[in-house]
Image (cartoon, coloured by chain):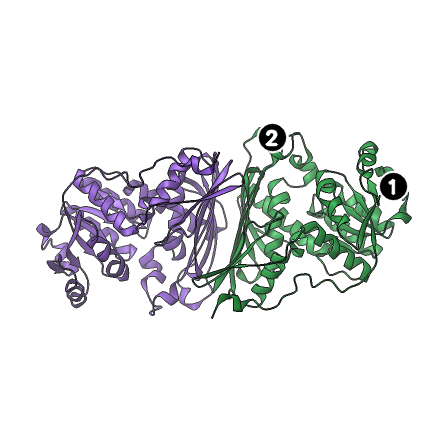
Chain colours: A purple, B green
Amino acid sequence: MSLSNCLGEFAERDWRTGAEGTVRLALVGLGWWTTERVLPAIEAVDRCETTTLVTGSRAKGERVAADVETVSRVLDYDEFHDGVGREGYDAVYVCTPNAYHLDYAETAAGLGKAVLCEKPMEATVGRAERLVDVCEEAGVELIVGYRMQTVPAVRRARELVREGVIGEPRFVTGVNSQRLLDMFADHDQWRLDPDLTGYGTSVVDLGIYHLNTARFLLDADPVAAQASMRSDHEAFDRVPDELASVLLEFEGGVHSTCVASQNAAERTYLQVVGTEGSLRLDPAYHMDTRLRLTVGDRSLDVETPDANQMVDLFDYFAEAVLTDRDPGPDGRHGLVDMRALEAIHRSAESGERVTVDS
Amino acid sequence: MSLSNCLGEFAERDWRTGAEGTVRLALVGLGWWTTERVLPAIEAVDRCETTTLVTGSRAKGERVAADVETVSRVLDYDEFHDGVGREGYDAVYVCTPNAYHLDYAETAAGLGKAVLCEKPMEATVGRAERLVDVCEEAGVELIVGYRMQTVPAVRRARELVREGVIGEPRFVTGVNSQRLLDMFADHDQWRLDPDLTGYGTSVVDLGIYHLNTARFLLDADPVAAQASMRSDHEAFDRVPDELASVLLEFEGGVHSTCVASQNAAERTYLQVVGTEGSLRLDPAYHMDTRLRLTVGDRSLDVETPDANQMVDLFDYFAEAVLTDRDPGPDGRHGLVDMRALEAIHRSAESGERVTVDS
């Protein structure tokens, strides 16, 4: 039997029900991710449009707005919190430093707007819990922006795991590293300030991709963490994890190891090894995810549709808002990651295995 | 600049000085590794020949000897310990269950024979220390059979690390898994008996490849360990590590993560990620090691000579014996692995970070 026979028909974008409409978005936070990646992606999504920009710098907001035809309003943060222009958008995308997510989500919830919140949800478990509470109390949808969950290659991998093609999953290994200091001229930036990121930098910003993708692929959550971290470069003197290695035990006994570093050559990789074979995402997390399946001594590159990860994420969010259902990853899903992040950091600090709160 | 310009001339078998002669070997332990892999390899090494087989089953010994022209004598274990036929061999290859290595090495040392001892050196740190002592006291050479250290692709990788092609190494990740129960019909076997293996099975038998290869590539030793282990299948009920995940901190701050399992699909993999790029051995540990170099967004398969790993190991050992020098990996090198194995198991048992004794 050829390995390709393991691959049946599969609709990687099964969330598309054909619901029509347009979700008008307010984007909160105009960092490079929003301007370079999110705005162009939204322009490519039929069911979304950006109508409102919320920023601390009105000048920057006006400059960005000038290039986006659909934007009708630029708000400063106070205006947003006051509900100015609330009739002009249906949902809010929160892409600020982690420690501000709650403030904007709380306002959005109070205004009755659905929320797409970047990951990690907040800087601490406590604030993330409040974020979930305010959205639940207001009855607004909250989706956490785990864009890997809508990547065709990742959804295909999950399906192959579910179908048992690699047998029973036994362990997941992965890497997510990049050279942050080369990406941003300003080394005095929020990703290196634990008051704004939460517990550190490499694990909350990079390791979370491995953590959440492993959860998604395994359909299981971590129950215990061990970790080691170190920072040597002076730019990392406020965070513990210039380099972090993390060992997680999942429900059902699957192990996961991951190395995350904001100060190493770029490398992204995740593999699931089962009793019968393995699945590898390599590269894993940027815009070029590739999937390879190995069973016995046979390997196969699994073809998946081309994808712009942010286009898929916003299309998925639009579907949820237009059909008024919450398919996840919702706030309670995101809280599991927050509790795991906390456990990972506590383990690195104490040198002891830490149970993940549930 | 093309990435291939990073690759200068390199002699992967630089140990070959041209020394002539023949090392006559006694092989102790006639398991499948010795009969299937070692005997044919030695036949291919000009400077070695197998003259003596030492086994618990004389019938098996005679059967094996019938196919190997150079073998002139089959000894049982008592005869070996009594020095019978000592004039017929110059060196001893010890490939018994780990917990018996000391006994045979001690006899070999007493007879003034050089020793090539399979890894891990022994079942416990204490017995491994005695093994080193008896060889040192007798003044015989002791080399531990870390065959990865003589694999051309691995030596090439070490050279590229040393030359700084990937910048400063930051972390190593790897996997070594196989389905032991499919490899041996008899599940009641020594690799699953901790009295014979030492601390467990997956880490001492498979994880040690990652540990020792990482040490070799980094030219550094581990200083602390964290680990998690579990056994679920009944065949593994006497050992803690049907599945093991290990996190090591090395001198100089490099991290290493490794997953080892005797009960998962076969997968072998090791990568070193530095500040500028990465080197990957994939597959890593069986007879088909392949090396890939990535710097920035460019990758290159590094061509290395075809190799039979056991041929190279025995040629290397012959060189050491014929020239009367001990280029390592010697007993003191092997002791570092033993202490790391002990620390890994203690960490898994306690859930705490354990310092590796030095």
Q: Which residue is drawn at the image coordinates 57% and 68% (left, top)? A: B163
- Above or below, B249 against A141 in this view is below
User: What is the chain letter for disc 2?
Assistant: B
Q: CA distance from mark 1 to mark 2?
A: 37 Å
Which of discs 1 and 2 lies nearer the camera? The answer is 1
- The three-letter amino acid code for the residue at tag 1 is Arg
Quadrant showing the C terminus of chain A: top left
Q: Which residue is drawn at the image coordinates 47% and 65% (left, top)? A: B276
> Is B119 on the left-hand or right-hand side of A94?
right
Q: Position of residue B147 (x, y in %)?
A: 67, 52
Q: Position of residue A291 (x, y in %)?
A: 41, 46
User: What is the chain letter for disc 1?
Assistant: B
Q: Quadrant of residue B333?
A: bottom right
In the displayed orientation, state which residue is furthest to the front. A2
Disc on res. B235: 2
Q: Nearer the viewer, residue B47 or A121?
A: B47
- Above or below, A205 against B51 in this view is below
Residue A28 visible (yes or no):
yes
> Which one is earlier in the sequence, the residue at label 1 or at label 2?
1
- The three-letter amino acid code for the residue at tag 2 is Ala
Q: Secondary structure at mark 1?
A: strand
Disc on res. B73: 1
Q: Position of residue B356 (x, y in %)?
A: 61, 53
Tags 1 and 2 on a common chain: yes
Q: Which residue is drawn at the image coordinates 89% and 42% (left, top)? A: B82
Q: Secondary structure at mark 2?
A: helix
Q: Which residue is drawn at the image coordinates 22% and 57% (left, top)? A: A39
Q: Nearer the viewer, residue B253 or B108?
A: B108
Tell me if mark 1 has few (under 14), some (14-19) or many (20+) residues whose alpha carbon lies within 10 angstroms of its own: some
> Is B119 on the left-hand or right-hand side of B249?
right
Tell me if mark 2 has few (under 14), some (14-19) or many (20+) residues whose alpha carbon lies within 10 angstroms of its own: some
